Amino acid sequence: MATPKPALKALVFDVFGTVVDWRGSLIREGRRLGKRRNLELDWAAFADAWRAGYKPAMARVRSGELPWTTIDRLHRMILEDLLRRFGIRGLSEADKFEFNRAWHRLAPWPDARAGLARLKRRYVIATLSNGNVALLVNMARHAGLPWDTVICAELFHHYKPDPEAYLGTAALLDLAPAQVMLVAAHKDDLRAAAACGLKTGFVPRPLEKGPTSEPDTKPEGDFTVNAKDFVDLARRLGA
């Protein structure tokens, strides 16, 4: 007799880009700062540069060049560099702190809240993000995201795609990896999760990097589920 496949019990979500629109949110926050401080700037370019610094900064931690550091602190390091690069002067410490907290106030994609609410009826839903706990909790409150719990790299001192993040998440939920599905818009994240035994749900976000970007949104047969958005994912998973 064949061994039955483990039933799916939990969905864990990449957050930046998959659940929330970081780019559009940062552009809006930058424009508000610009109006308050009389700054003429290409805020779309600034947002793109801020996000572009994310992986290199994490790589410095993962390589051991920097000690364990939260994403909030990495975002602030990147911000200080960008203020110099873009020639922005005269911001107070309060200005910088509040602007860095823009990452705590990212807006969800239009389908996110409705899709998560449906999925929550049938599954445990949680974050699996490189963001830190405070950031994710504040974002959830700001955006109305109905997580059952917040799980992130800070709990493991390992950023994705380190296996410790995926396997540690399953262990915290007291589930086998195959009972957990990572939902993400990023194929590299999904493939790293699959290598650890998790199921995978691909939800493309074609506008994540702006209307002129050309992301890879093609469905892949090696993912457990390919869906158009979170509402479609809920339908496909019977929620």
Image (cartoon, rainbow, N blue to C red):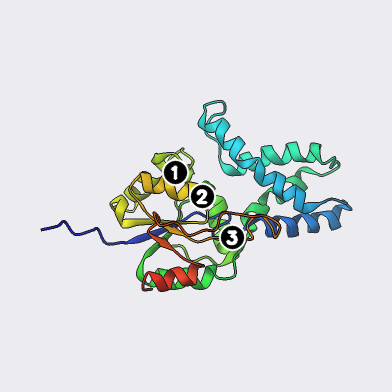
SS at circle 1: helix
- Quadrant location, the N terminus: bottom left
Name the residue type under label 3.
Val
Q: Which residue is mark 3?
A: 20
Question: Looking at the image, is mark 2 or mark 3 earlier in the sequence?
Answer: 3
In the figure, residue 32 lies in which quadrant? bottom right
- Give the farthest residue toward the top: 65
Q: Residue 152 location in percent, x, y?
A: 47, 48
In the figure, residue 9 lies in which quadrant? bottom left
- Tell me the crowding category of disc 3: few under 14, some 14 to 19, or many 20 or more residues within 10 angstroms, Cα based: many
Name the mark on residue 155: 1
Q: CA distance from mark 1 to mark 2?
A: 8 Å
Name the residue type under label 1.
Leu
Specify whether 150 is left or right of 53. Answer: left
Q: Which residue is mark 2?
A: 133
Q: Residue 137 location in percent, x, y?
A: 53, 56
Query: Contact (CB < 8 A) between labels 1 and 2?
Result: yes
Q: Nearer the viewer, residue 36 or 17?
A: 17
Q: Residue 119 location in percent, x, y?
A: 42, 69
Q: CA distance from mark 2 to mark 3?
A: 16 Å
Q: Nearer the viewer, residue 225 or 74?
A: 225
Q: CA distance from mark 3 to mark 1?
A: 21 Å
